[in-house]
């Protein structure tokens, strides 16, 4: 299968404080992201279909990934704008393409960061959620 790889991120801030991060991220992933990897960073407008972060916390992440898939990317990694590469990420691409996903344990419990409303929606008690590892969204 011919895979089209994409790294996606959003780095929008009214004061442009994320510009330094976006620049560093783009530069380092261009160097270490792997041949043929395209980097998509929304830094001036939200990804297509996305509400602002204020209107829907972190919803832009889903829309950024969906846009990369819509244009034909088959292997997509999300990185927060503050992330940067220090070495070749080919092993990460291989893991993604072998397993179909890469999940990183955040070392926190889901219950620590879930609202009462979200827990009720999914029928999970706070005690149960404290036993579920939170996956890192970075």
Image (cartoon, grey):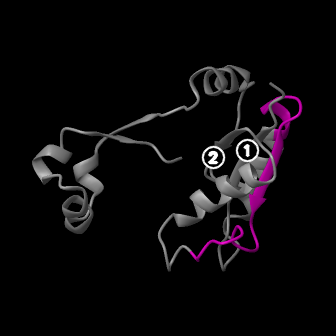
Query: Which quadrant of the structure image shows residue 70?
Result: bottom right
Residue 17: horizontal and vertical position, in percent? Answer: 67, 69
Segment colored magenta: 30-52
Secondary structure beneath disc 1? Answer: strand
Q: Note whether 108 is above or below 42 in the view shown.
A: above
Give the dominant element type of the magenta stretch: helix, strand or loop: loop
Residue 38: image x %, image y %?
Answer: 84, 44
Give whichever of 99, 52 is nearer the camera: 99
Disc 2 to disc 1: CB gap under 8 Å: yes
- The relative height of residue 23 versus residue 28 in the rendered view (above or below) is below
The answer to whether residue 102 is left or right of residue 6 is left
Badge 1 local density, few (<14 within 10 Å), some, or many (20+)? many
Could you classify mark 2 by the number of other residues whose Cα lies within 10 Å: few (under 14), some (14-19), or many (20 or more)? some
Expressed as whole percent of the image width and height from the top left, the position of residue 97 reads 66, 25
Residue 5 location (% of width, % of height): 78, 37
Mark number, residue 79:
2
Question: Which residue bears the numbered disc 1?
Answer: 7
Q: Quadrant of the N terminus?
A: top right
Q: Is residue 100 magenta?
A: no
Q: Of 47 and 54, which appears nearest the observer?
A: 47
Q: Secondary structure at mark 2?
A: loop
Which residue is drawn at the image coordinates 29% and 56% (left, top)? 113
Is 125 left, or right, of 24 in this rendering? left
Mark 2 or mark 1: whose residue is earlier in sequence: 1
Q: Residue at x 54, y 73 (%)?
A: 53
């Amino acid at each position: 299968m011919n895979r089209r790889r994409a790294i996606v991120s959003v780095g929008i801030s009214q004061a442009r404080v994320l510009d330094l991060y976006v620049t560093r991220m783009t530069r380092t992933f261009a160097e270490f992201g792997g041949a043929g990897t395209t980097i998509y960073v929304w830094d001036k407008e939200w990804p297509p279909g996305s509400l602002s972060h204020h209107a829907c916390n972190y919803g832009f992440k889903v829309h950024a990934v969906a846009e990369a898939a819509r244009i034909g990317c088959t292997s997509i990694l999300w990185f927060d704008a503050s992330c940067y590469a220090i070495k070749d990420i080919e092993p990460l691409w291989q893991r993604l393409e072998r397993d179909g996903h890469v999940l990183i344990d955040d070392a926190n419990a889901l219950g620590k960061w879930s609202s009462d409303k979200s827990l009720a929606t999914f029928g999970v008690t706070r005690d149960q959620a404290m036993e579920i590892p939170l996956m890192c969204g970075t």
